[in-house]
Image (cartoon, grey):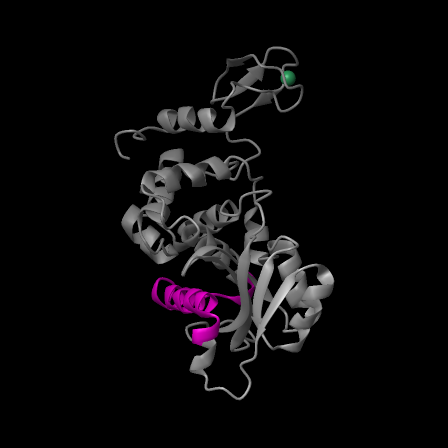
Amino acid sequence: MEECFATDEQCRTYLMGLRWPEGFSCPRCAGTKAWAAQRNRLVCIACRHQTTVTAGTIFQDSRLPLRSWFRVIWQVTSQKNGASALGVQRVLGFGSYQTAWTVLHKLRRAMVRPGRDKLAGRVEVDETQVGRPGYKGRGSPTKTLIVIAAQEDGKGIGRIRMARVADGSAEQLLGFIKETVAAGSHVHTDGWKPYQGLTALGYEHEITKLKGQPLSAATEELPRVHRVASLLKRWLLGTHQGAIAPEHLDYYLDEFTFRFNRRSSASRGKLFYRLIQQAVQVPPVPYRTLVGGAAQ
Ligand SMILES: [Zn+2]
């Protein structure tokens, strides 16, 4: 890592290869030839449009050197549990917590692959509540409802998806399933009424009624979602001390999902590559948008 990306120049060359794998392409006219101008600018030979390899990506307008970005990405992807803002600030010696927090949140935006495919086959779906004991923000409700979908992979867990939902209504739960699970799939839920709309939506619906059974029954009947829920809670509490505002929770769910769905990636380097590859495909996010935390 330190050898390959010791200078911003090396980082830029790496980004070029990921952003333009077929060679330079002008964002305005799709021209394929450019000359290098000062301050890392590329000038399109056909239309004279000036651009940089970071323009239009999450790296745009950042005052942080690219090699610092790369170090944060390495921190996030090389550690089993990712990195917290405090940890990044400490390890990389950033002057401010805000810088570390901002970089991590921008990266979280890159963790959802644009146009990712839906889960299919046999999928378990259930909700869980996440508490926020460390959070001291304004008007903090104590619990947030999360819905989780976990694909079956034999006895194990395949890929997952999760989202924060406003409530346990049919609109919220079925909306999530329509977005994340391919029609025609086999969806396994408990007897919660709103899920009864699944058949009408074209899913094969398996219901395991848990009412009247001891609490542990849920763990036995829908073991995959419950395993994911407990890993998620442990991660939120362990790595982030539970100190997450509800308006930012979506991005932590994306980070958890990104890492979980690639947990078997043989090499950490691949995760690093994948995150940077997605980072040059995601448009820039201004700081005020990050702080506002709007999910859309
Ligand atoms: Zn051009």
> Quick check: 194 above or below 21?
below
Where on the picture, by quarter, is residue 181?
bottom right
Q: Residue furthest left?
A: 3
Which residues fall within the magenta stretch? 219-247
Q: Residue furthest right?
A: 200
Where on the picture, by quarter, is residue 196?
bottom right
Asked if one can make out residue 208 in the rendered structure from this viewpoint, the answer is: yes
> Which residue is pictured at 66% across the width and 60% down the height?
203
> In the shown orientation, is residue 38 left or right of residue 184?
left
> Quick check: 45 above or below 85?
above
> Which residue is pictured at 42% across the width and 81% down the height?
216
Q: Residue furthest bottom?
A: 212
Asked if one can make out residue 248 in the rendered structure from this viewpoint, the answer is: no
Q: Camera-side residue: 203 or 173?
A: 203
Looking at the picture, how far across and down is residue 287, in whole percent? Answer: 54, 49
Looking at the picture, how far across and down is residue 232, in whole percent? Answer: 42, 64
Looking at the picture, how far across and down is residue 14, in whole percent? Answer: 40, 27
Q: Camera-side residue: 156 or 53?
A: 156
> Quick check: 12 above or below 193?
above
> Which residue is pictured at 36% across the width and 25% down the height?
10
Q: Camera-side residue: 234 or 294?
A: 234
Quadrant of the rendering where the N terminus is positioned: top left
Residue 231 is inside the magenta segment: yes
Image quarter where ligand 1 lies: top right
Looking at the picture, how far across and down is residue 152, in whole percent? Answer: 47, 58
